[in-house]
Amino acid sequence: MALKKELSLFTATMYGVGIIIGAGIYVLIGQGAAIAGNVVWLSFVIAALIAAFTGLSYAELSGMFSKDAAEYVYTNRAFRRKWLSFIVQWIMIFTLIVSATTVALGFGGYFSFLTGISPVAAAAGLLVVLSFINYIGMKESSQFNVISTIIEMSGLLLIILAGILFFGKTPVDFFSASNGIAGIFSATALIFFAYIGFEELVNFSEETKNASKVIPKALVLSLAISTLLYILISVSSISLLGAEKLAASSAPLTEVMTSVIPHAGVLMTLIALFATSNTVLAILIAVSRMLYGLARNNIFPAFCAKTGVRKTPYVSVFIVGLLALAFLLIGGIKTIALLTDVGIFIVYVFINASVIFLRYHQPRAKRTFRTPFSIGWLPVLPLLGIVSALLMLLHFDPILILYEFGVAAVGVLG
């Protein structure tokens, strides 16, 4: 039974924005400021450029192949090596499940602040509830997503408004880089976690109306909206609080708001609950569709492709929920953010390479979207995407990279 097509351009874009604007900005802006200093806003700009290179590649590929398990489909069509395509998809699956678990723990921390309930228990409860919403259907999930995205965007817009109204409250040199150029790029490697998510939209293709045209547009729009918000948020936060106070805070955006509105802490905590839960839901949906797509391609067991009366892949939904629960004790958000970024950058290398290979081997294939700027047949931006992803990998601890290769080996041997 096929999945039910529920998503329009608006709801797909809201999913993209909702996935991207999650726990990352609420936590990592402080840690980014600790590394880059007042020029942390530039790290957001650089991260946006890197995301844009690969985002446009995803847009082109999604306009060619509107299928779930997108990373597998794209790389298999380009390289014709099923083992390689499986490794790329496996790394993405593992990375996203770990990411969902970490963001759920972030939710648990905020929920514990309000109620006193254990963060792990709150995170587990969230994963169970969101897995049920995932099972109910895409229509209900998208309604939850739209509401949550509007709420979390409203919270960020409040900070931007405060930044405009109280600009200059703290004298700031916006070009002061406490650790120089190296610090800016190291902060970029960490902050990139805040941009992760746009690529998950391609795994909603089989539930999107006119997906070959809608998904590329939604990718570009969601990335553009998120980038604008992030840059304005980073400038506002530095203006209102300064890098040192941002770096010292465990809840930096809450502290930014309380610096101008003393009792805004509870409001920002509530908004953070919606932001984190929205991100977790979107990841759970995306990964369950990845398993569904792999089963449809005879890579995973056929039962992962089973759909019930709700026209959702209920077996895959159940498996992903269980795996996310199993990873609840994995560690802190900074470590997992770095591990997630390593996995994502590895995948980005192959996605950008897929665009280049397909441009060379299938130049006449139908494309509803083409990445701009080419020299002859060679698309420039995917090439820059490969180079930037490889350069970013140089800023990570080699142990994290070896860990990802270990994950790939487990997937192949398993």
Image (cartoon, grey):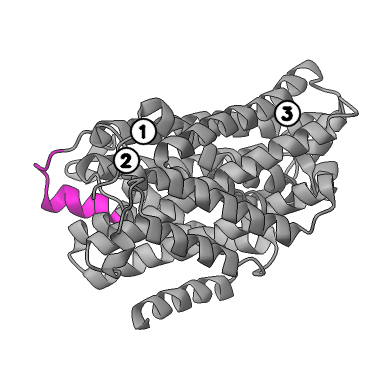
**Residue kind at label 3, given as amino acid type:** Ser
Give residue 7's mark.
1
Q: Earlier in the sequence, mark 2 or mark 1?
A: 1
Instruction: Please indicate whether residue 265 sits to the left or right of residue 293 in the image.
Output: right
Q: Quote the CA–CA distance across marks 2 and 1.
A: 6 Å
Picture coordinates of residue 312, whole percent (x, y): 36, 49
Give residue 207's mark.
2
Asked if residue 211 is among those painted magenta in the image, a careful observer would answer no
Instruction: Please indicate whether residue 8 sits to the left or right of residue 187 in the image.
Output: left
Q: How many marks?
A: 3
Q: Earlier in the sequence, mark 2 or mark 3?
A: 2
The residue at the point 73 percent across, 28 percent down is: 236
Residue count near mark 2 (Cα–Cα under 10 Å), binned few <14, some 14–19, many ≥20: many
Q: Are marks 2 and 3 in contact (CB under 8 Å)?
A: no
- Chain part drawn in magenta: 353-366
Q: Earlier in the sequence, mark 1 or mark 3?
A: 1
Which of 336/236 is in front?
A: 336
4 versus 88 height, above or below? above
The residue at the point 84 percent across, 30 percent down is: 264
